[in-house]
Amino acid sequence: MRKPEFLLNQSIHKYLFLILIGFATGCASVSDVATGLTNAILNQDDPQTVRDGGAAYLILIDGLIQGDPDNPGRLLAGARLYGAYTSMFVKEQARHTRMMNRARDYSRRAICQDYEDFCKVIDSPFEVFDAGLKNEFTDEDDVPMLHTFAVIWAGYIKANKSDWSAVADLAKVKACVERVIELDEKYDNGSAHLYKALLNTLLPKALGGKPELAKKSFERAIELSKGRNLMIKVHYAERYARLVFDKKLHDRLLKEVINGDTNAHRLTLVNTLAKIKAKQLLKSGKEYF
């Protein structure tokens, strides 16, 4: 039986209190805190609890970064949390953009601490950027930092898609995602393929979108995640099946999500949200097609 919501909220706040005590007594590391609480959030099956409790952790991580503004571990933790929380729960456009901007700032500062030469070419023309990317990121150990940087940058562009100076960097983000795939396509259950698909459907086909390439990436992402990440199928239905008016594929994918198992390590929250979204899309699809 699931705990009552007020008890779940109490457990989140209790955990945050213990974190603060741990830092005060020197018995907790930022890495341990970020990993522990992130896992607790991702394994949660009550989105409202995370929505309510997550904001407290945003403030906590902001404070930790202010205390050590050049610490790449803290900056990376901040980028990941802001990016995940914003994409899942923040719908109001101005606030969504503002919070993704902060995630982008944290991820860029993190990568600049550990990859100084790459940092110098981020704003350079694409050819210079691409050469620096390939020179700096050369093995699997580089993937976690680059993956976070690329994912947050993609979210930043989506949040600022009316700003053509932001959209102009789309090719650079795609290059980062491709580099992650080259180095370790299985990282994070193959999520780089999901982001490659999303990037190829961000713009209409007439403006450079590539829906058929996106279809292949969606399929590869499902394969690498062994079907455990239900949100991939939701995006596949919404961003590809609707784009090409494939109602049969659209409905099949969404019904698979609705009938799927939400319980998966670090995917339970995402899968719970995927089921909610799938039901909404299946209902609205009756008018869309």
Image (cartoon, rainbow, N blue to C red):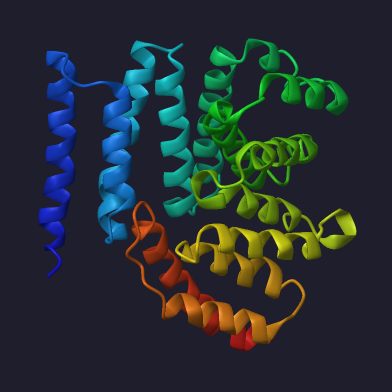
Question: Where residue 31 sits in the image (x, y, percent)?
Answer: 33, 25
The residue that appears at 20% across and 21% down in the rendered structure is 28
Decide: is 72 above or below 219: above
The residue that appears at 50% across and 46% down in the rendered structure is 188
Question: Where residue 181 sits in the image (x, y, percent)?
Answer: 66, 43
Comparing 241 with 17, the one in front is 241
Question: Where residue 256 sits in the image (x, y, percent)?
Answer: 49, 79
The residue that appears at 18% across and 44% down in the rendered structure is 12
Decide: is 127 above or below 272: above
Q: Specify the quadrant of the image occupied by residue 121.
A: top right
Q: Specify the quadrant of the image occupied by residue 38.
A: top left
Question: Where residue 245 sits in the image (x, y, percent)?
Answer: 74, 80
Comparing 87 with 211, the one in front is 211
| Number of marks drawn | 0
Quadrant in the picture for the C terminus: bottom right
Q: Specify the quadrant of the image occupied by residue 66.
A: top left
Q: Is residue 217 left or right of residue 256?
A: right
Quadrant in the picture for the N terminus: bottom left
Q: Is residue 131 left or right of residue 22?
A: right
Comparing 171 with 286, the one in front is 171
Comparing 135 with 15, the one in front is 135
Q: Is residue 261 left or right of residue 14?
A: right
